[in-house]
Image (tube, rainbow, N blue to C red):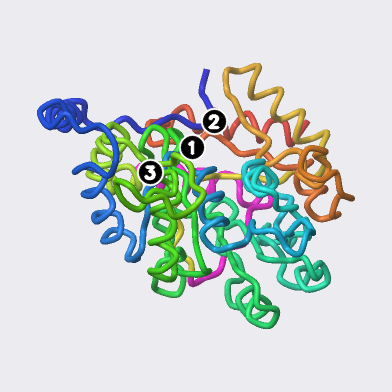
């Protein structure tokens, strides 16, 4: 079976050397040597400052929200954050879990990111933040979102889980917003097995977040804040350092897969529109079909032939009761019903990929 994605596993001997060092130092967590090294190397690689490594991408969203004061009570009313319904459940559930009501605004029909024109009508006296998603690594309209946030004194937290290494207008996309979060889950472009990171605009927010991920502790006998345990371990950092060492090889292989799909399918299926100034990371290859029935027919044909495609992202989150059960914004609802992400990972062979393309072409003609 060809999965929709597959973890990139780096050189085993190099990983063993990192683990040998962990055994020698006998330091497994609490900002160890490898966590410190990975923090510095990621800041250099991504071209950012104020990066904090955490246990996973969901906690990255929660810590960013807490560090920026978004989840603090608003005169007894539940604080709100405007976000997109076209995303993974963690974007919304991380807010709800921390006492912030996600308010869903519709997406742009071409970029599939949160449409800035739909943000302002959703703002209320309880709105504390905007939480857009760089969907599939595509850049949101960061300039327009920043203008709305500035006008209404709102925080902006970008869920950048798909945007590792993406540059926009010549600099890291992760520099935008008051914070940008990353997921380092096993199937992400860059991973630490499990893990995540937050990039803060301001050093003061980073310093507060450092305490929050360590139970609010600022010293051996001093607890300054209500915190949680969200620290990255040395074993996670070891995997991340090995993966980072081989990033260029991984990126090159995934780009080749992405461009073969583009060449074979771009004239037959609708693809995501990206800005010309975007330096993309080729993390995903989503395609949109004419209708839901066609998408499901293709997915069934692929699975019958040993290929898994996924409905990223279905359902549109506005219809999910546990995060609000709101009316479905029409663009998101329509897109979610007709989209499939095709298998993309460094090890996918050109032969297997051509078989996938041929299967899709056959179903489109049926």
| Residue 81 image point, x, y percent | 70, 60
> Could you tell me if residue 191 is visible in this image?
yes
Of callouts 2 and 3, which one flags the residue occurring earlier in the amino acid sequence? 2
**Rounded to the nearest whole Å, what is the CA distance between mark 2 and mark 3?**
16 Å
- Against 147, is 183 above or below? above
Report which residue position mark 1 lands on.
Answer: 344
- Against 191, is 69 above or below? below
Q: Residue at x 64, y 20 (%)?
A: 303
**Rounded to the nearest whole Å, what is the CA distance between mark 2 and mark 1?**
6 Å
Image quadrant containing the C terminus: top right
Dot 2 surroundings within 10 Å: few (below 14), some, or many (20 or more)?
Answer: some
Query: Is residue 167 a member of the stretch shown in magenta?
Result: no
Which label was assigned to residue 4? 2
> Could you tell me if residue 161 is visible in this image?
no
- Against 159, is 116 above or below? below
Label 3: element kind = loop
| Residue 134 image point, x, y percent | 57, 57
Label 2: element kind = loop
Of callouts 3 and 1, which one flags the residue occurring earlier in the amino acid sequence? 3
| Residue 245 image point, x, y percent | 22, 44
Q: Residue at x 77, y 56 (%)?
A: 78
Report which residue position mark 3 lands on.
Answer: 190
* Span highlighted in magenta in the image: 253-277
Q: Residue at x 78, y 73 (%)?
A: 120
Tell whether 310 sits left or right of 198: right
Q: Are marks 2 and 1 in contact (CB under 8 Å)?
A: yes
Q: Nearer the viewer, residue 18 or 336?
A: 18
| Residue 39 image point, x, y percent | 28, 52
The part of the image, by quadrant, that contains residue 286 is: top right
Q: Nearer the viewer, residue 12 or 272?
A: 12
Label 1: element kind = loop
Tell whether 270 sits left or right of 291: left
């Amino acid at each position: 079976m060809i999965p929709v994605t597959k973890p990139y596993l780096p050189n085993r001997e190099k990983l063993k050397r990192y683990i040998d060092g962990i055994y020698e130092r006998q330091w497994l967590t609490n900002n160890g040597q490898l966590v410190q090294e990975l923090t510095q190397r990621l800041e250099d690689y991504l071209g950012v400052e104020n990066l904090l490594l955490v246990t996973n991408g969901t906690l990255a969203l929660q810590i960013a929200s807490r560090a920026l004061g978004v989840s603090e009570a608003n005169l007894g009313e539940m604080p709100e954050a405007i976000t997109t319904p076209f995303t993974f459940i963690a974007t919304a559930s991380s807010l709800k879990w921390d006492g912030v009501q996600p308010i869903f605004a519709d997406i742009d029909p071409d970029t599939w990111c949160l449409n800035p024109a739909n943000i302002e009508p959703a703002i209320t006296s309880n709105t504390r933040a905007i939480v857009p998603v760089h969907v599939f690594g595509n850049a949101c309209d960061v300039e327009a979102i920043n203008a709305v946030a500035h006008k209404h004194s709102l925080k902006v937290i970008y869920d950048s889980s798909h945007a590792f290494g993406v540059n926009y207008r010549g600099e890291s996309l992760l520099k935008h917003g008051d914070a940008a979060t990353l997921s380092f889950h096993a199937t992400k472009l860059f991973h630490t097995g499990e893990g995540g990171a937050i990039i803060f605009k301001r050093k003061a927010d980073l310093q507060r977040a450092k305490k929050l991920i360590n139970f609010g502790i600022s010293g051996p006998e001093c607890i300054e804040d209500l915190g949680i345990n969200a620290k990255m371990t040395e074993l996670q950092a070891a995997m991340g350092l090995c993966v980072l060492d081989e990033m260029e090889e991984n990126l090159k292989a995934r780009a080749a897969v992405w461009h073969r799909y583009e060449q074979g399918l771009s004239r037959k299926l609708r693809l995501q529109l990206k800005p010309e100034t975007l330096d993309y990371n080729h993390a995903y290859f989503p395609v949109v079909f004419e209708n839901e029935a066609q998408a499901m027919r293709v997915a069934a044909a692929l699975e019958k032939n040993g290929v898994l495609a996924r409905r990223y992202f279905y359902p549109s989150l506005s219809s999910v009761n546990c995060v609000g059960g709101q009316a479905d914004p029409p663009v998101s609802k329509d897109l979610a019903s007709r989209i499939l992400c095709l298998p993309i990972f460094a090890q996918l062979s050109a032969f297997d990929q051509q078989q996938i393309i041929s299967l899709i072409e056959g179903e489109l003609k049926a």
